Image: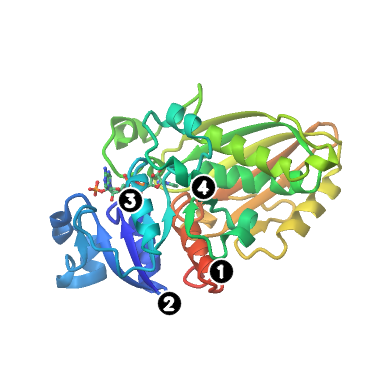
Amino acid sequence: MKVGVAGCTGYTGFELLKLLEEHPDVTVTALTARNPSVIKSDPRFFFLYGDDCDAKINTLEDVNFSTCDLVFFATPHGVCMKHAKNLLNQGITVIDLSADFRLRDQDLFERWYGIRHIASDLLDRAIYGLPELNRVDLCGAKLVAMPGCYPTSIITGVLPLIEERCLIKTLIADCKSGVSGAGRSANNSTAYGEVAENFRAYGVNGHRHLPEIKQEISQIIRRYEETELHGNVDIQFIPHLLPMFRGLYSSLYVETKENLSYGEISELYRRRYGTEYFVHVLPTGMLPETRFVQASNHLHLYINKLAESKYVNILVAEDNLLKGAAGQAVQVMNLIFGIAETVGLK
Ligand SMILES: NC(=O)c1ccc[n+]([C@@H]2O[C@H](COP(=O)([O-])OP(=O)(O)OC[C@H]3O[C@@H](n4cnc5c(N)ncnc54)[C@H](OP(=O)(O)O)[C@@H]3O)[C@@H](O)[C@H]2O)c1
């Protein structure tokens, strides 16, 4: 496959590029950055392409994606929506790592992201790129909206509880991410001096990932509507900034409708994820740590339930740049093109 990457200089774009360069079925034919000339002095690209490092890099305005089978957008929201229609009309598949096509409700998107959606007619066509949730729909998909890094951990964390018709009543998501979650562009709040030896919450009055989490959870619940399991879930989501570069950890507290035992819940999770290559339910006493999933597409889950508590506790660790972004995007690409899901990710 011939593949293009828009935004290859960013954190997720560069991770994507490294994976794609190692992928046996992919040739990277077009890359974009806003200022292609900086690539010549960027050692990351020298490592990949040597002296010829600026050969295939252009601005988005000048790039020619016409020979590509697929283009990834690892750009901020508002960029992919300008180009998606044109690419789709040429038969080119689009995988967007940004939020442009995640929210199906145009008004909701415009309210949370503060910009007008200029390709809202495509919102219905986009498939939400969480393979463990939408594997069948992703096979052959033309437009994919990759999940945010927090939603990946939260939805994966509660999916078995919802699918097994054990409707969740309350979900408290206490989540922490390394600073790479905010992207590469310089920003005072993620500068070393502001982050090192420090720990703080942010987005407490509402983070942009909250409507996405709500949308996907209510969508999964709607699949079971006929079994009277509908209703609103009370979701509290507070993200925190960790004084480290990459890694994401979510501590989820879930109040369920029925009071299931630890044994029942852990059996349910093992059954649901037993055949998944990238999602691992760790055994009793083996807690997830960000360093054990770092630089991999694996996600570690741990289930806990104290007999005297009404809450199920789910701990989730992932690498925000891989399972939370670029790795998962390659997993989706493999599904779309009928390649084994793990190729290029082992
Ligand atoms: N970081 C994460 O953990 C994570 C996880 C999941 C999803 N995402 C999403 O993935 C996307 C990329 O995130 P990131 O962390 O890789 O961001 P980043 O490090 O800031 O990189 C952004 C990339 O987009 C380019 N870019 C910026 N503004 C642009 C514009 N107006 N037009 C065209 N290109 C532009 C940048 O080029 P220059 O080199 O010219 O600046 C850079 O290559 C975002 O939408 C983000 O929300 C990120």
Name the one closer to the observer, 99 or 323: 99
Q: Residue at x 33, y 51 (%)?
A: 83
- Is the distance from the Cβ of mark 4 to the nearest ligand 1 atom less than 8 Å? yes
Residue named by callout 1: 341
Q: Which residue is mark 2?
A: 25
Residue 167: image location, x then y, percent: 78, 38
Q: Nearer the viewer, mark 3 or mark 2?
A: 3
**Please, is residue 111 above or below residue 69 in the view?**
above
Please report whichever mark, 1 or 4, sits nearer to the chain's N-terminal start.
Answer: 4
Helix, strand or loop at mark 3? helix
Residue occupied by mark 4: 147
- Give the Cα separation between the discs numbered 1 and 3: 27 Å
Q: Earlier in the sequence, mark 3 or mark 2?
A: 2
Position of residue 4 in the picture relative to residue 321 (left or right) = left
- x, y (%) of residue 116? 37, 32
**Which residue is pictured at 54% across the width and 56% down the height?**
292
Q: Amino acid at mark 2?
A: Asp
Return the disc, 1 or 3, that comes first in the chain's sequence. Answer: 3
